[in-house]
Image (cartoon, rainbow, N blue to C red):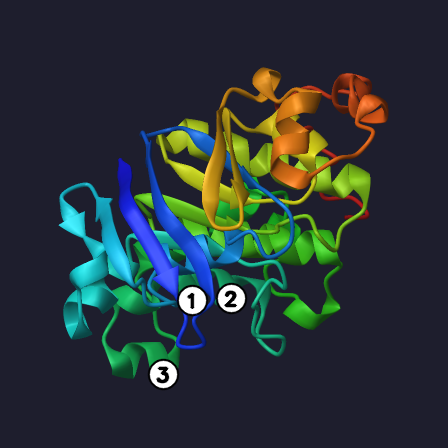
């Protein structure tokens, strides 16, 4: 369970990115975080994992207040948070397997991480995760030889290799084509359901958020202006979040070409 209470962030310039944001994300729930550019979505995610220091409020992961941790306690807490990045954040010269195993770096001594020596259990789990994301045949391929969709799959496997208690996802489909975007969202949702893992996905694509998340939170100017089920995201609500626009073309398009939720055997082909 993740609980945010009155989370606020004001930068030294005086700009306020978050204004007393409060909500809970129970185990297994996938939350889509939407809103216009500058609404505070990325700041919110980065405050949770403390890449950005919050100005006020609480960030409770189970019983731990992440907002007050420092030093080793903060490093240990970050092991509990899996992060999937928009730009993948892979080490290009390393293999797919080495990148996935880097998810265990917070759990091994420095000398073992330097030598990239991991336990048999860690390696076995990495192979299992690569099979789940459709990349088992690519384990020894360098990351810079992969397509965008394949790189994002490696990022998913690396985050899950941490055995996290919370998954934070920052624009996972921004650089991907529509078919690959749907596959990536489906993989994230499946992983969360299988592990009863709470997740927050910062996403610009409202149609993908409607189809692949359990709940949507809309931010505008650093404040929560909507929190509800995807089907409650009406034209009126979208206008409240984004401003005046003709939303008629969006209605119904998100389910017009819906695919099965379960991954198929050819997900990795050409992705």
Depth check: give the residue in front, 233 or 46: 233
Residue that numbered label 2 is attached to: 99
Circles 1 and 3, Cβ within 8 Å, touching? The answer is no
**CA neighbours of label 3 inside 10 A, class few (<14), some (14 to 19), many (20+):** few
Residue 41, position as x, y percentages in the image: 52, 51
Depth check: give the residue in front, 251 or 166: 251
Residue 162, position as x, y percentages in the image: 35, 54
Residue that numbered label 1 is attached to: 102
Q: Is residue 160 above or below residue 199?
A: below
Residue 116, position as x, y percentages in the image: 39, 76
Q: Is residue 193 above or below residue 267?
A: above
Residue 103, position as x, y percentages in the image: 40, 61
Depth check: give the residue in front, 179 or 3: 3
- Kindly give the residue lying farthest to the right in the view shown: 249
- Residue 156: which disc? none
Circles 2 and 1, Cβ within 8 Å, touching? The answer is yes
Q: Label 2 to label 1, Cα distance in Å?
A: 5 Å
- Residue 114: which disc? 3
Q: Quadrant of residue 119?
A: bottom left
Q: Label 1 to label 3, Cα distance in Å?
A: 11 Å
Residue at (67% x, 40% y) in the render: 242
- At mark 3, the secondary structure is helix
- At mark 1, the secondary structure is helix
Q: Is residue 178 above or below residue 69?
A: above
- At mark 2, the secondary structure is helix
Q: Label 2 to label 3, Cα distance in Å?
A: 13 Å
Residue 262 shown left or right of residue 57 in the figure: right
Q: Quadrant of residue 76?
A: bottom left
Residue at (63% x, 43% y) in the render: 134
**CA neighbours of label 2 inside 10 A, class few (<14), some (14 to 19), many (20+):** many
Q: Sequence-wise, which precedes: disc 2 or disc 3?
A: 2
């Amino acid at each position: 369970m993740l609980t945010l209470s009155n989370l606020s962030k004001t930068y030294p310039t005086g700009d306020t990115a978050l204004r007393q944001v409060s909500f809970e994300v129970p185990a297994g729930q996938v939350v889509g975080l939407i809103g216009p550019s500058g609404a505070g979505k990325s700041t919110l995610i980065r405050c949770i994992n403390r890449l950005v220091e919050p100005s006020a409020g609480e960030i409770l992961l189970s019983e731990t207040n992440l907002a007050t941790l420092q030093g080793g306690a903060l490093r240990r807490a970050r092991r509990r948070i899996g992060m999937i990045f928009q730009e993948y954040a892979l080490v290009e010269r390393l293999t797919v397997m080495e990148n996935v195993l880097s998810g265990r770096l917070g759990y091994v001594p420095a000398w073992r991480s330097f030598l990239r020596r991991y336990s048999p259990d860690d390696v076995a789990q990495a192979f299992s995760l690569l099979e789940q994301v459709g990349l088992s045949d690519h384990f020894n391929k360098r990351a810079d030889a992969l397509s965008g969709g394949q790189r994002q799959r490696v990022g998913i496997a690396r985050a899950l290799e941490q055995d996290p208690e919370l998954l934070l996802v920052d624009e996972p489909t921004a650089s991907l084509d529509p078919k690959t975007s749907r596959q990536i969202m489906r993989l994230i949702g499946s992983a969360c359901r299988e592990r009863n893992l709470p997740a927050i996905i910062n996403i610009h694509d409202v149609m993908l958020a409607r189809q692949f998340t359990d709940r949507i939170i809309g931010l505008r100017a650093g404040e929560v202006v909507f929190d509800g089920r995807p089907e409650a995201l009406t034209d009126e609500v979208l206008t409240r979040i984004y401003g005046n626009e003709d939303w008629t073309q969006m209605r119904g398009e998100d389910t017009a070409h819906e695919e099965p939720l379960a991954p198929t055997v050819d997900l990795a082909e050409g992705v």
